């Protein structure tokens, strides 16, 4: 029988969910926030961590859900399926009255943790005026498990290496993250520019882990990875 922490029940107030949070929980939260997850501060209550993945990554989303459920951090309600409409520009310019768009249907799954007052520090670590940022202290929390989750979230196989999508961060923040990978994990990496449209989304950057460091990267993160994510290391 699986034993969960006392704050597992839905009707416990956030102020009662005080932890302590074990290292694995913090690692998965940090790795997720470096990727696609976001922290939601609820007025007068605390912070919850929200997870969303497209249908392609359903297995991974459920891996995250099962991890947090086993630790007592989320309810027994399965992740919710959601549908979004995404408008894509087909051609023309922003001044073109005949500009046409294509509407695509995007489906995925989402869930969130319970709200914890004791996660306020995580929010402060990752957000400034509501915008996700990289604080220097993150270096202390980028454990092998956190790195694994970050790669599973935002990494991708770009033969013959692995590219991490860091385009939501500034160049100085990407440089800082790149230095962690170099200094802490001794990975051979480089920062690459990403060409994105529209114009206001240019000047974005990704981190590329080179071919000669892939065996080392695999040795670090493979033991923690969900099998559905092995393709991100070129293991298919």
Image: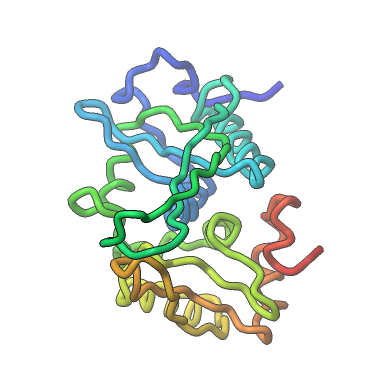
- In the picture, the quarter occupied by the N terminus is top right
Q: Which of the 4 image quarters holds residue 114?
A: top left
- Residue most toward the front? 98
**Residue 57, percent from left and from top:** 64, 46
**Residue 202, percent from left and from top:** 34, 72
Q: Which of the 4 image quarters holds residue 98?
A: bottom left
Residue closer to the observer: 98 or 9: 98
Depicted 196 relative to depicted 82: above or below: below
Q: Is residue 183 left or right of residue 229?
A: left
Depicted 72 relative to depicted 56: above or below: above
Q: Which of the 4 image quarters holds residue 117?
A: top left
Report if residue 109 is visible in the image: yes
Residue closer to the observer: 225 or 190: 190
- In the picture, the quarter occupied by the C terminus is bottom right
Taking the spot 43% from the left edge, 67% from the top edge, the residue there is 166
Taking the spot 49% from the left edge, 66% from the top edge, the residue there is 165
Taking the spot 57% from the left edge, 29% from the top edge, the residue there is 81
Residue closer to the observer: 73 or 36: 36
**Residue 56, percent from left and from top:** 66, 46
Taking the spot 27% from the left edge, 36% from the top edge, the residue there is 41
**Residue 48, percent from left and from top:** 37, 34
């Amino acid at each position: 029988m699986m034993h969960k922490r006392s704050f597992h029940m839905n009707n416990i107030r956030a102020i009662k969910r005080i932890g302590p949070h074990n290292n694995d929980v913090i690692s998965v939260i940090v790795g997720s926030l470096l990727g696609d997850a976001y922290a939601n501060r609820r007025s007068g209550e605390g912070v919850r961590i929200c997870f969303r993945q497209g249908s392609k990554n359903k297995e991974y989303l459920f891996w995250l859900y099962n991890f947090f459920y086993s630790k007592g951090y989320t309810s027994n309600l399965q992740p919710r399926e959601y549908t979004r409409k995404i408008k894509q520009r087909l051609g023309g310019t922003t001044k073109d009255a005949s500009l046409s768009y294509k509407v695509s249907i995007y489906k995925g799954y989402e869930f969130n943790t319970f709200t914890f007052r004791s996660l306020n520090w995580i929010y402060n670590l990752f957000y400034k005026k509501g915008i996700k940022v990289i604080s220097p202290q993150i270096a202390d929390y980028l454990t092998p498990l956190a790195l694994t989750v970050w790669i599973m979230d935002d990494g991708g196989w770009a033969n013959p290496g692995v590219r991490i999508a860091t385009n939501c961060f500034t160049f100085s923040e990407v440089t800082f993250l790149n230095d962690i990978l170099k200094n802490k994990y001794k990975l051979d990496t480089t920062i690459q520019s990403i060409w994105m449209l529209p114009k206001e989304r240019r000047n974005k950057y990704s981190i590329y882990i080179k071919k000669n460091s892939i065996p080392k990267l695999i040795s670090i993160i493979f033991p923690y990875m969900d099998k559905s994510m092995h393709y991100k290391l070129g293991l298919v």
